[in-house]
Structure formats: C-alpha cells, structure tokens
Amino acid sequence: MKRAIALLLLFNFQSSFAENSILALVDEKIITYNSIEQQFALVESYEEKLAVVNSRINVMLQLEKALEFDIYPLQSDVNQTIIELAAINNISLETLKSLANFDFIVKEITEKLSILNLQRYVTKDLKFNLSNDELINKCPIINNDAKIKQIKIAQIIISQIDDSLISSDNLDKSIKELLQKISTHISKGASFESFAKLHSQHPSYENGGVSKWITIDSPMIKMIDSLKDGEVSDIYITNMGFAIAIKIDERFISGNLKDCKEKLIYLNAEKFYSNWVEDLRSTSYIKIYYENL
C-alpha cells in the first residue's frame, strides 16, 4: 500500500513538473509551460506551439528594453485601458475585475502598452519622405474611388524692382506693368522659361518657374487650371508678390491618397521595428527546448 502511495505521489510530481517544464531560455530568464499555457490552449500543431514560444521570446526582449529605457506605462494608462476593455465587451468594470483571469488580463495590457511605448520610442525619429510620384505609383486609383485633380504650373513672381526712383506707393503699379509686358511677349511666342529665369524672384526661377504638383483647392488655382495651352494668366497676388502663370500639365490622383500615405509610413515604420527586434534576438542568448513542446 505504501509503495502504491509512493508511486502515485511520484506520478503526480512528474506530471506537475512536465506541465511547468522549461520551454526556452532568454538570456537569464526562462519561459515555462505555465507562463504561456493560455496561448498553447489555442493551438495544436508543433509549428504553432513553436510560433507561440518565439512570440513570447520577442515579447520578453522588448519588455527588457522598455525597462532599460524606463518607458513602462503609467498606472493611469493601464487603468484607462481596463475601463475601455470593459466598455468594448459591454460588461461592467466590476464584472471584468471579478474574472478569474483578471490578473492575466492586467499583465497582458501592461505588456502591450509597454511594447507600444517602445515602438514609438524606437521609431520616433524616422523620416520617410515619399514623393508624389512614388505615392501615385504605390497608391493607384481604384474603382469608385474619388479622383482628385492636380496641375503643374510655371510662375513668374516679382516682389521688388531695382529702381530707386520708384516710390513705395508706385511699386505695385510698376510690378504689374512689368508683368504685363512679360505676359505680352510670352503670348507672342517668347519663352516663359527664359523670362522666369531672368525675372522671377521665387526660388523656382532656377527651373523656369515650374512648380510641384498642386491640388486644385483655391480660386487662384482653379483660374490657372482653366487656362488654355500656352495661355498666360491674369496677374494675381501671392504671399511672395505679384505673379503670372501658365499651366504645364495635369493628372488625377486617388482621393484616398492621404490615407494611403499614412499606411505606407506605418508599414515602413513597422518593418523598421521588426528588423530592430530581430537585431535584439541576434545579440541575445536564446535556447529553445524543442523536445518539451
């Protein structure tokens, strides 16, 4: 009888040990079966279990960095997330707190907020400069998508005239007279580009006054968009002086361009962060006990 009891106790001890066996070693920390038991309950295959272990390794490495950078979430942030979680699941805060696994929920929320803080910290100085042409190529117009028209123009902008005899009261009049003479010459076949390089006082003079792509979102741009090929606009005022312009080109872009751009920036940041986490793994001691999965 004593032998039977001893065997039973030994069996129970071995079962308990197996359930809490070590699955991985990450630097000086361990991952046990019990620590990821709930995630394991959702998977069946060996490959899925291995993915769970690798995911936990990544979490541990990121939490270690969050601790190093002192960017753990404030308790107020954790509490607010708990309140929002209760609201999303349409239960009271008291009901949520009464759940048997509430401590696990708090731990998971804290970890996720810590990693979110780490992601922001690591990617905060990233700059992804996407040109309009790159956006057009990566964000094509889709069916039923609102189309936005853009135009490219060339401008001659003048704010000053080098003539000491002209009074400040007559400056605007003199600028307009000069622009009108230039416009007349261009209308008769003279090169807009040449006059822009010679007379324009805007930085774009170097490339003949040609602008970047402009969305038609103001009366002045609408006026220029209505110009015929080679037609010179009436004189108009800008924040840098008086100007004349011609329309160079036009195109239509996706109405969801802004959303697409934000998505591309997010994906680039996500890729950068993913590579950063992989670098963490490469500089850490990691041992997975495959036989225990």
Image (tube, rainbow, N blue to C red):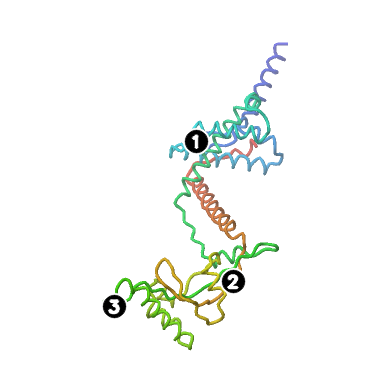
Residue at the disc numbered 1: 73
Q: Quadrant of the N terminus?
A: top right
Query: Looking at the picture, how far across and down is residue 118, in whole percent?
Result: 49, 43
Q: Nearer the viewer, residue 101 or 248?
A: 248
User: Which circle marks residue 213 in the picture?
Assistant: none
Residue at 50% across, 80% down: 232
Compare marks 2 and 1 and give the one earlier in the sequence: 1
The residue labelled by disc 2 is: 251
**Vertical side of 48 occupied by 89: above or below:** above
Image coords of residue 74 (percent x, y) = 49, 33
Q: CA distance from mark 1 to mark 3?
A: 64 Å
Would you say the residues marked 2 and 3 are in contact, meaning their CB atoms lie under 8 Å apart?
no
| Left or right of 147 in this view: 122 | left
Label 1 is placed on what type of residue?
Pro
Residue positioned most to the left: 164
Q: Is disc 1 surrounded by few (<14), some (14 to 19) or many (20+) residues within 10 Å?
A: some
Q: Considering depth in this image, is 21 or 103 the residue closer to the camera?
A: 103
Whole-angstrom CA distance, mark 2 to mark 3, is 41 Å
Please identify the residue farthest to the front as the structure is shown. Answer: 169
Q: Amino acid at mark 2?
A: Arg
Q: Earlier in the sequence, mark 1 or mark 3?
A: 1
What is the CA distance from the residue labelled 2 to the residue labelled 1? 47 Å
The label number, if any, that marks residue 163 in the structure image: 3
